[in-house]
Amino acid sequence: MEAFDVIVIGGGVNGTGTARDCAMRGLSVLLLEKSDFGVGASGNSSGMIHGGIRYMLSDRKVTERACRDSGYIQRIAPHLLFRIPFLMPFTSRGEAATLVEKATWYATEVYVGAYDLYQPLKRGKPSTRLTPEELYALEPALRPGLGGAVTLDEWGIDAYRLCALNALSAERHGATVRNWTEAAAVLREGGRAVGVRWRDVLTGETGEARAPAVFNASGAWSPALGRRTGVSVPMRPGKGTHLTLDRRFSNYGIICNAVDGRQMFLMPHENDSIIGTTDDDSYGDPDDLEPTSDEVEYLLEGVESLVPGVRRARVTRAWCGLRTTLYEYGKNEDELSREHQIYDHAAEGAAGLLSFVGGKLASYRAQSQEAADRIAALAGKAVDRCRTHEEPLPGGEALPDPAALAARYGVAAPAAARIAYRHGARAHEVLALCDEDPRLKLAVCRDEGILAAEIVHCARHEKVRRLQDLRRRCKLAVGACAGLDCARLAAQLAAHELGWSADEARAELADLLELGWRERRTILDGHQLAQEELVRAAHRGLGDL
Amino acid sequence: MTAAGSLQTDVLVVGGGLAGALAALAARDAGATVALARRSPGATALSSGAVSVAPDPTALPSTTFAARAGTVESARRLAALQPGHPYAAAGVALDRLWESLEFAARELPLLAPPSPRPRWLATPSGSARPCGLCQRSMVAGDLAEAKGILAVVAPRGHLWFDAGLVAGGVNRLAALGAPRAVIARLDLFMWEEAALGRPHDLARLLEAPGAAEAVGAMLRRSLPAGAAAALFPPLLGLSTAARVPERIAHAAGIPVAEFLSDLPSVPGLRLAAAIDERLAAAGVELVRGELAGRGPGEAVSAGGREVRARSWVLASGRFVGGGIARRGTLVEPLLGIPVLASDGPFSQAGAHLASRPAASLTRRDSGSAQPLLSAGLKVDADLRPLGLDGRPVHERLFAAGAVIGGHDQAADGTGLGVAVFTGYLAGRSAAAAGGRLVPAPRGVRA
């Protein structure tokens, strides 16, 4: 039986962030993720390192911490962040405005102005007030009759890669990192949690590991793990659904109000746009979660109130996750705190077991630091000081120039730019594969700028065990083409790297396509439906997948 | 046919894919004057290049090729199991399936004559499809007939197709009667521009004088012992006239075939080109551009020309072709014919199939039949689209191909078989539909 200082359960942003922090401070770490990094709330979040302006009224501390940490994340992963300026339009003209509306504008300006106090922490630009003319010049697709807007500045991120990079960094600092390996049971002896029995869900291999500290960061899966372990992990899981549009539909993020008055948004994000989000209590199985028609309609209707043309937009995916908010009875979902808490299960006869609940993606690093402090105390080890705000994540060491990369390696500039975005300084390693084998310059996805070299690099160096892991490493088969062009080629490349048989490659391909279908079936309309017909003919009709 | 600009014709076919082409050719063959209107090349160019027709729906995965039903019997079984399928809707006319396959092969000489048993053709993703009709360039790759060892050619210079996946798929079918597949690696496409080419680029490279011969000579040197045929990636020329498979086979001294293609599809492009060529030779008037009009007997505007036809064949495809569209609700955009047919729970009249949310029309397991993907027009036994009252919307309006709903080609494996069969029948019926030019088609949207 292997022994560690800490076993971290869950490969979301808190699990991987904590594993990295512990490993960097000299603890021996085992990280277990039953699927792949970020598949839960992290990857299915809005993909923003935002300052949490929404929480300013209720949780100003959350706002401040998020802003400060946003600055740190920009420092350690500069390649992975991008600025998203937001517009918060006023929904009536000055001359027609009622007293209540004028008061609302004033309150909004004060609100955003107060948020400005925190903006320097995350290199955000200060808010400005736009006249109606300025607003329509910036965003002509907005409905007529708006009374101007205030702006605020946020940051977007590829949250799946953020999780994967934390896991890879943890591994480079000595952690044992296992994805597709579940914590089957927490081992208990004499009132203590002493380790974990794990099972590799792909190979069936099982094993036991012991540690004085077991850190449960399994998010929405915590209640189930708690039930298996005989402890209680109180939380209010909330289902959040997002839609992806096939292009950058607006120039700026636009904050809208849904039919029930909730705040929601349409925002450009990497090559696409995202509409989000719903927030509904969920009592369902986190492994059996799908977006519903009414969530899709709710989101489109909310954006339509300010951007009528969104009804003609091509929705490419609907996707959802469960955020874990702290348990409180008698509150609406939106009123629940976005604070986090670390529960110690000692009183339930499981000393040494900690559970993490709540928190924000933007504050993952600070949350992980706090968790690592608690873990070090449990493990009884003197540890180094936290350095996760200083030391870059893999690829964050430098920002390569895409044009120079394109020229050096003889690849298309847009592909070089996307690879530089995803891999930062490691884009050189990715593209250097083309020097050895020029065939690897072949475009796998022209939308996302995926070259064969990137598939090979991810398969070799980024803990890819299944084809679907490439959805999260390099956005394989999640775009408007729905995997028509890329899926088989990527399966071939991955099969070659990972030693899959023809049957295994086919099984992986079928699995990848099935995941895509689940995300599309509620939104199939217009051109996306025509694309589905093509994908279905090629992969199911012809390929019998 | 009258003077410039305006066109009088017996039959107007809407849609230029395989269904429309066969309707036009069948009507022309029956002596009618025919115009074919299309706005773009049909979805046939996006096909594998072969015609599946019908897999035996009663076969188990372990049933050998030899023990499976032939093409016509398979279609009959499918019709019996799926009453909403176009093969079933056609009723006794299904007896003419074989006739339609023979007609297609006669009209489009790049197709090999049909064989009573389907040909089992390998696919790029490691499976095999039974095909009632295929291109001549594919025949030697029939896994049900091939003997000895099948050499699966792997061009070293290009990553698009993976001979390992193809050969693995063939070898998995050994118990069903497939030959043993062995990979033959060739130093083909070994320079960078070729390595980054798309399939159609590679197909053109092989057409060049001497190129196919060089490949054949290379193949002869690399053949595994006991090889009885060589199976190439579907890149053997964009043009049939370039005779790429024949030239390679001659130089290699062994029969040569290509496996089926996914997208982009060189055999699909080849089939589309063969259709165009044949339509022109058969004297079908081709009208390009958008079509606006109300139905048979009425003057319509097609690509800016006025066209008047006694009968119509609607072969406008499904979602890719644009014959059926969903914009919040399912519609047939040209004539406003109601979308009533689908494979699944909402196929009964009055179930308001068209306006249901996508989630209600899809099932979670993508492998099951999907009502949304199988949505289209409901037709009577003469292939006339039906209105909400269950009666034909017009006595001389026929439908062919994927615009007819009730089947999900991808799930039931019929592929282009429905296009060939219904195209042929609709073309014959349209040519035979008599009567003068009369206005006011009943039930068609004003």
Image (spheres, coloured by chain):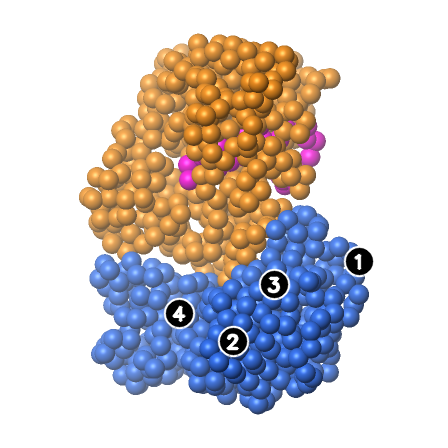
Type of amino acid at the residue the image marks with label 1? Gly
Type of amino acid at the residue the image marks with label 2? Ser
Q: Residue at x 36, y 73 (%)?
A: B238
Q: Which residues are magenta?
A: A264-292
Closest to the camera, between mark 2 and mark 1, is: 2
Q: Residues within 10 Å of mark 3 (few under 14, many from 20)?
A: some
> Where residue B350 is drawn, which disc sits there?
1
Type of amino acid at the residue the image marks with label 3? Leu
Instruction: Give the residue at mark 4.
Output: B266
Instruction: Give the residue at mark 3.
Output: B334
Chain A colour is orange
Judging depth in this view, the residue of B398 and A119 nearest the camera is: B398
Q: Secondary structure at mark 3?
A: loop
Q: Residues within 10 Å of mark 4 (few under 14, many from 20)?
A: many
Q: Which chain is blue?
A: B
> Residue A278, image x and y in percent?
62, 31
Instruction: Give the residue at mark 2.
Output: B6
Residue B229 in the figure: left or right of residue B285: left
